[in-house]
Image (cartoon, grey):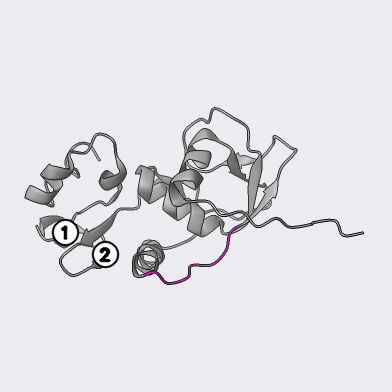
Amino acid sequence: MSDTVFTRVSYELGTLVKYIELGEIGLPDIQRPFVWKNWKVRDLFDSMYRGYPVGYLLLWQNGLVDDRVIGTENKQKPPRLVIVDGQQRLTSLYAVVKGEPVVRDNYERDNIRIAFNPLEGRFEVADAAIQRDKAFIEDISCVWSSETDIFEVVEATSTGCARRGR
């Protein structure tokens, strides 16, 4: 008699982001708040860009509805999966890809802005100097936005999509 306790499932980043956006992936009440510093988020994107392993996510199929959501907006569905391991990574990915604020451990909202220099293949935490440097896409969340004109990003990297209210 062999009952399967774990099932390995591979999700693409876009699928995970969509599940979080809908509310299908949430946080159990036992999860700590988001505590990663912005440089850790930058390093996560750098590792993914370079093809380095970034670890597994452990999700638990949920039958409860009293769990927390990722992000700050209301969701369409209650979570059917909750994050047991990988909350900092998954929350980071969602926040940057969607340009959504995270809720820090002091319960304040904070936007994480990660910049990318495509000529050097380098990620940085966006600051005043990076915002002035035309070699950088100053906020990579705009790359995934349906409102972004990617040609504007190419023509004038730091003024392309980051200045459109992002």
Q: Quadrant of the C terminus?
A: top left
**Is residue 49 on the magenta stretch?**
no
The image quarter in which residue 100 lies: top left
Q: Which residue is mark 2?
A: 124
Q: Is residue 151 above or below residue 105?
A: above
Q: Where is residue 25 shown, x and y percent of the image? A: 58, 43
Cβ atoms under marks 1 and 2 closer than 8 Å:
yes
Task: Find residue 78 and name its label.
Answer: none
Residue 52 lies in the magenta stretch: yes
- Comparing 148 with 15, the one in front is 15
Is 55 displayed left or right of 138 in the figure? right
Residue 14 x %, y %? 43, 46
Answer whether residue 117 is visible to the viewer in this image.
yes
Q: Where residue 154 sits in the image (x, y, percent)?
A: 12, 50
The residue under the point 52% across, 34% down is: 22
Which residues are drawn in magenta? 51-57
State how far apart marks 1 and 2 are (Cα): 9 Å
Tell me the quarter of the image containing the N terminus. bottom right
Residue reaching furthest to the front: 1
Amino acid type of disc 2?
Glu
Q: In the rendered structure, which disc, 1 or 2, sits on the residue that comes first in sequence? A: 2
* Tag 1 residue: 136
Tell me the kind of residue under disc 1. Answer: Phe
Residue found at the far top of this picture: 76
Residues packed near mark 2 inside 10 Å, few (<14), some (14 to 19) or many (20 plus): many
